[in-house]
Amino acid sequence: MTSHLSDDADEDDLVLDLGGADFLSDPYPALARLRDQAPLTWHEPTGQWLVLSFEHCNQVLRDRRLGRLWTDKVPGERFEAFNSLHRNQMMENEPPDHTRLRSLVAKAFARGHVERLRPRVRALTEAMLDRVDSGSGFDLIADYAEPIPVAVIAELLGVPDEDQHLLRPWSAAIVAMYEYRRTAGVEERANVAAAEFADYMRGLAEARRAAPRDDLVSHLVAVEDEGRKLSGEELVASAILLLNAGHEASVNAFGNGVVALLERPDQLAAVRGDPALVEPAVEEMLRFDSPLQLFERTAREEVTVAGVTVPAGGKVAALLGAANRDPSAFDRADELGVTRRPNHHIAFGAGLHHCLGAPLARMELQISLPTLLRRFPRLALAGEPVRRQTFVLRGFESVPVTGR
């Protein structure tokens, strides 16, 4: 089966274009129709199996026979900076390398950093909203959702305030490589950004090695487990992964979720009226329009998924957004329900590669959402939100709002 899935497509020949404008605008109807055909299907344009059901996405994410096996996205020495970042990070490795990398990073990350940053997040949310004009309106993404996680992760890592403006452009250039239909220009910008970002982090690590502080880079420099330490390139890759993944998840989850709330006044009113609903509302925002839509795995040996034999070396992509809208796993799966409990979504993945920064992202969302609603009791869309033309990392480029 190949795929651009359009409304007039023959059900026997559904074609899913992962970079098509109509699909990027709202992928869920197309994903539902494909999921109804089969929980797993071959996707010729990308040369991989797509897994669409909640049950089988969970299987793929947890089955150790299906791993993250890094192969250079763009072969050749010219792109070594980009490839090196990924080759040396935990997300692109399997045990025993993954076990070593994750245990060392988790050990440094667990030193109270999330709770240490809670007052800072509260202060940032208030400060960002102090700067906007509720009457003339503002951009929910550029003026609020985007600056907060960048500032938080910069403080977590120990990046000085005067350098924080460097991080977002580097991150945006690097993550653009994860999308389908990337151009040669995207590849070149990603590699340049990777080289510049890595050089910066090497310098910061050297500074912290000479004069440690109470920040994550200092702890990554010092962390040791049974005599094992992070190499220089592993430390750089780990720090950049935390910035890129943490920033993208928080910004896109917040933007996607708040737009969904603003388009559903009853759900927005429910959250406004009951502070106890903030936590389940955040989980529902993550489920309903997931910030990460696709996570690739490679078969390390022959494995059967949904009755289909995937040969060793075969690529399998778990479509997390499709899984989180699977009606066999969630009642009224295509409806936003802020009272949904329990909510067993897999927006942060599952199994060995479950997102290490999930507690930080949740904390940011649980503070930034109620702060926004309290400060702007008449918050409403002031125009049509603009979607990013991306699928793997799904979010908005711009969301115009007004507070009056």
Image (cartoon, rainbow, N blue to C red):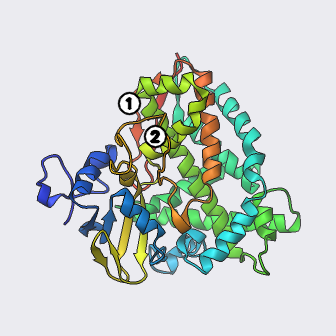
Q: Given contact means CB atoms under 8 Å apart, are the residues at marks 1 and 2 in contact? A: no
Specify few, some or many for label 1: CA neighbours under 10 Å numbering under 14, 14-19, or 20 or more.
Answer: few
Residue 140 x/y as whole percent: 53, 33
Residue 326 x/y as whole percent: 34, 50
Q: Examine the rendering and report whether any part of residue 182 can be seen.
A: no
Is residue 324 found left or right of 281 in the rendered image? Answer: left
- Give residue 94's quadrant in the image: bottom right
Given this view, does label 1 or label 2 mark the residue nearer the observer?
Answer: 2
Which kind of residue does numbered mark 1 sit on? Answer: Glu
According to the image, label 1 marks what residue? 384
Is residue 287 found left or right of 180 in the rendered image? Answer: right
Point out the tag, 1 or 2, that comes first from the N-terminus. Answer: 2
- Give residue 239's quadrant in the image: bottom right
- Looking at the picture, tell me which residue is in the foreground, 217 or 282: 282
Q: Quadrant of the N terminus?
A: bottom left
According to the image, label 2 marks what residue? 256
Work out whether 198 lies above or below 111: below
Identify the residue at image location x=23%, y=54%. Answer: 36
Which kind of residue does numbered mark 2 sit on? Answer: Asn
Which secondary structure lies at badge 2?
A: helix
Is residue 357 found left or right of 117 in the rendered image? Answer: left
- Looking at the picture, tell me which residue is in the foreground, 90 or 310: 310
Identify the residue at image location x=48%, y=68%. Answer: 62
Identify the residue at image location x=43%, y=71%. Answer: 297
Residue 324 x/y as whole percent: 40, 50
Work out whether 173 lies above or below 224: above
Residue 331 x/y as whole percent: 37, 42
Which secondary structure lies at badge 1?
A: loop
Q: Residue furthest right?
A: 211
Work out how far the residue at label 1 is from the one at label 2, CA to CA, in angstroms.
13 Å
